[in-house]
Image (spheres, helix red, strand yellow):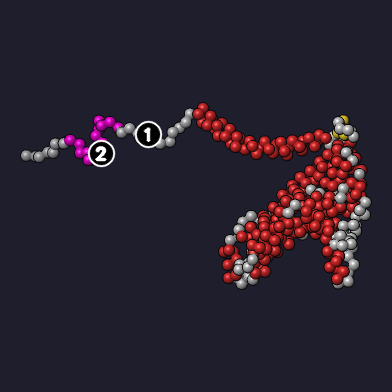
Amino acid sequence: MTLTSRPGPPVRDAVSRPEHAPRPRPRPSRLRIRPPGRLRRDRVTEALWGYAFIAPAGLGLAVFYLWPVVRTGYFSLTEWGAFGGHTWTGLDNYRRLLSDPEVGRSLLNTVEYTVLGLVSIPLAIVFAALLNRDGLRGAGIYRTLFFLPVVTMPVAVAMVWRWLYNGDYGLINHLLAQVGIDGPNWVADPDTALFALVVVGIWSSLGYNLVIFLAGMQAIPQDYYDAAAIDGAGPVRQFFRITIPLLSPTAFFVSVISVIGSLQLFDLVYVLAGSGQTARANPAFPRLETVVQLFHDRAFVTNDRGYGAAIVMMLLVLIVALTALQFRLQKRWVHYG
């Protein structure tokens, strides 16, 4: 008798799903998909809120900066009468600029003052490095003394320096006389007038540049100096190999601000040399006259406002061109990181 096995029911895994059991429903996703219309409305709302937040600053920029530039550009194409009113003259004022020797002379003085004034940048770096030394006593007092000229009114600074530069009773000539030197009349001598003006400009801007460089030095990681000291580099080598390269972005910022400020020099010249006929009586005035000084004389002394607007528009183009050139050249010497 042969025993045969009868097929039994199919063996199923205890974990497996029964054959006719309903499939589990997928869990709803936590990410809510917004319809395209709702998404566009949300983006428009966010953009409107962004424009609302920047509207006060943008309005102030447009009213107090952009609109005056546009109006000045329009007035530079007009001629003003002695009692007000103006007539359209086109490019006549700009043609006059090209043939006016006083414009070229004032422009040359301004550029020369700007170039000489850049000496304050390396001086500020050196003084900032000295004040950044560890363990220096009275560092806060030194910083305050350096920064005092920055918070002092430029007219007050110029008045003090005008007394110092006086050829008859000035303090500088008095000190020189003690050692047997007959000092010149600094702001009335064509050979010394521009250099005397540069000294005042450097003295006035040194504190601001020093504070900026000091902040840049304190942002340099100390690990670089520790690694250089382990390799045997001394303080001088660390200064030129670490501090100077890593300060290049700060130096670029300071150079741009310094150039823009120097090209707009007016208050120091106005106090040291005067304006109008008083200034022209000074034999050194041709060496002191700047572009903004010339603009002031033409626009407010001789009432030639159309020509004065053309002068200041020429200065605006010069500032934009030099700033663009600085941004173009900074790729060669500025190191970020």
Query: Residue 292's spot in the image, x, y percent?
Result: 82, 46
Q: In what quadrant of the picture does the N terminus appear? A: top left
Q: Quadrant of residue 202?
A: bottom right
In the image, what residue type sits under mark 1? Pro
Query: Residue 114's spot in the image, x, y percent?
Result: 80, 53
**Outermost front residue:** 169
Residue 298 is covered by the magenta coloring: no
Q: In what quadrant of the picture does the C terminus appear? A: bottom right
Q: Residue 16 carries which label?
A: 2
Residue 20 is covered by the magenta coloring: yes
**Outermost top residue:** 37
Q: In which quarter of the image is residue 176?
A: bottom right
- The span from disc 2 to disc 1 (Cα, nearest Å) is 24 Å
* Main SS of residues in magenta: loop
Q: Which mark is residue 37?
A: none
In the image, what residue type sits under mark 2? Ser
Q: Residue at x 86, y 52 (%)?
A: 273
Can residue 70 be seen here? The reply is yes
Query: Residue 10's spot in the image, x, y percent?
Result: 20, 36
Q: Which residue is drawn at 86% across and 31% down?
A: 85
Q: Which mark is residue 28?
A: 1
Q: Which of marks 2 and 1 is nearer the N terminus?
A: 2
For the record, the magenta segment spans: 9-23
Mark 2 touching mark 1, by CB under 8 A?
no
**In the image, is 215 to the left or to the right of 265?**
left
